[in-house]
Each structure stands twice: as structure tokens, then as C-alpha cells.
Image: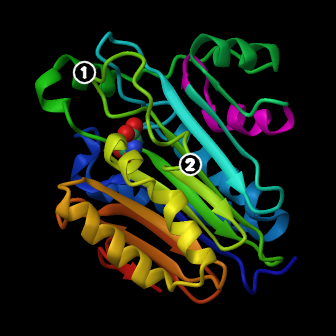
Amino acid sequence: MGNGSCKLIIHGGAGRLEGKVATKEQYRLGLCEALGPAYETLCEKGARAGVMHAIRLLESDPIFNAGTGSKLQRDGRVRMSAALMDSEDAVFSGVINIYDVEHPIEVAHSLRDESHHVLSGSEATEYARRKGFGFHDPITMARFIEYRKALRSREKFGTVGAVAVDEKGIVAAGTSTGGVGHEIPGRVSDSASVAGTFADSAGGVSCTGKGEHIINQAVAAQVVSRLRDNIPLKRILTELMKEGASRKHEFGLISLDRNGKFGVRSTRRSISVLYALKDSQHELNFTDGGRNLIL
Ligand code: ASP
């Protein structure tokens, strides 16, 4: 497989909503370090493998709110959610509120082969153990300190995600999150739902921002279903963000359509998605690509 038409876009959450564990430059570097290797995997092994590689790298980087470095919930524990979908077999698989694993996205991936594709809580964690995923404590000192300063961390979000199209035209999308921080234990995020992560042959989307808002607008599934109706990505995103802004919603997204058009948008100027993208002609990130990007 060559890399002529491979396209990859990844995100590291929603700008100022990320919390204070790293600087903008550190987020940029973290994204750029994941982008190159994941792009190679995409071109060699296809869209799903590229998305998985990107998310695994971002889950391992402690500055991002996913996997190691996830935010703590109100009871001081980390519960993570992740999901994956691609257009090859159109299976959505995910884990909700899983704990003590290193890579929630890998557990989500493993659920593709089961008869039930989404598991939550202790049962998701037990499933991971049965599948050989070892114990891993994702809590970092920086997140623990952030948790202790409860007021400052409240209402800050963060997540990682990736959307890819490979040379065969297969689209894949994945998202992984530690949640919003200080949430009621047991809260269900948008990330492991079709509102936060969706892909089919028309396109793929990964969202970030306030999960409740993303679910209210069924964002990812709605974008893809409008793409299926042949509405241009730019128009879809403009309408959706306008609606979100009018409802005072706070979220953003990364997306790719079947023609390889990239889209990054958010409902508010203050929520700029931290993203990086690559294809054979471009390599851009949020510091040079602008807030509302259609490429
Ligand atoms: N959407 C995630 C959630 O609500 C958080 C985020 O993307 O920042 O759990």
C-alpha cells in the first residue's frame, strides 16, 4: 500500500478546557510525535491500524486526558472510556468507565470480535483481564494534584481521538477519554457512544468537549448520516456548530469525509480543538492550521 491517498487527523482534546498539566507547546509536540508513526502505520496497514496506533501513543502520553494521565473522578478514581469504528465492517465497539488498564482503546478493539461490543465498569475491566490486559494504574502525580485542587479542575475536559482514511477508502475513527474530571462516579461520557465516535464509508468523526452536549446533538452520528446524504462537510459542520452555539453547547470535533476532506470545528471561539493532520501534501497542527479548518 502506498501513501498517495492516506489521510490522518488526530486530536488531543478541547484547547483551554484541557486543564493545566501541560503547555500549548507540549500538547503540540505530543500530537506531532504521535502523528508521524501513526501515519506510517495507516499507509502500511490501513485505517483501523492507523487510528489504533495514534490513540495508543496518545494514551501513553501523560499530558493527555486518556489512558495514563486521565482525570480523576469525584471519588478520586480514574474511569476511562474508549471506542472504535470503521467502515470495513461497520462495527462500533467500546468500553465505558473501565479502570486499571493501560490502553482502553485496545480493550475496545478486542470487543469487536465478541457477540456484544460495548462493556462497562467492573465487567469491562474483568473482560480485559480475561483477555490478558494487565493491571496498570493510570493516575499521574500531575492529575492527582489537579484533582486536589478540585475547584480549578471542575468543568475542564480532555480526550484524544483519531480519524483516518486509507488507500482503499476505508474510514476509521476512535476516541479515548478520562472524562471531564470530578464527575459523579458512573457518569457515562459521549466518547464510547455513537455521538462521540462514528465512522462509515461516508466519513468519520471523533468529538471532544462536554459529553452531555455532544450526546444532546448526537454529533458524530449526525455528521456522518448527513455526509451519506451527500451534504458537503463544510455545510454540515457550520450548521451543527451554529446549533450548538445557540444552545450554549461546548464541544469540538475532528472529521474526514469519503473524499478525504478534513474538518475541524468547535461551537465556541474559546474551545479550539488541539489537532494535527497529515496526508501526502499537508502536515498541519492547531498552531498553524487555524481554529475552523476545512481542507
Ligand atoms: N467528551 C469527554 C467527556 O465528556 C471529555 C472531552 O472530550 O474532553 O467525557
- Any magenta on residue 144? no
Kindly identify the amino acid type of the residue bearing the numbered disc 1: Tyr
Question: Quick one: 153 or 235, which is closer to the camera?
Answer: 235
Residues under labels 2 and 1: Cα distance? 29 Å
- Secondary structure, mark 2, is loop
Res 63 seen here: no
Q: What range is drawn magenta here? A: 97-114
Above or below: residue 259 compared with residue 198: below
Ligand 1's quadrant is top left
- Secondary structure, mark 1, is helix
Location of residue 144 (image quadrant): top left
Above or below: residue 150 compared with residue 237: above
Kindly identify the amino acid type of the residue bearing the numbered disc 2: Val
Mark 2 or mark 1, which has the lower sequence index? 1
Position of 220 compared to 3: left or right? left
The residue lying at 58 percent from left, 68 percent from top is 225
Q: Nearer the viewer, mark 2 or mark 1?
A: 2
Q: Are marks 2 and 1 in contact (CB under 8 Å)?
A: no
- Any magenta on residue 104? yes
The residue lying at 59 percent from left, 48 percent from top is 55
The image's mark for residue 194 is: 2
Question: Residue 80 location in percent, x, y?
Answer: 50, 28
Res 45 seen here: yes
The residue lying at 83 percent from left, 56 percent from top is 89
Above or below: residue 176 compared with residue 250: above
Question: Quick one: 42 or 227, which is closer to the camera?
Answer: 227
What residue sits right under mark 1 in the picture? 147
Callout 1 environment at 10 Å: few (<14), some (14 to 19), or many (20+)? many
Question: Residue 194 location in percent, x, y?
Answer: 56, 48
Question: Residue 202 location in percent, x, y?
Answer: 66, 74
List the single residue furthest toward the bottom. 281
Above or below: residue 104 compared with residue 124: below
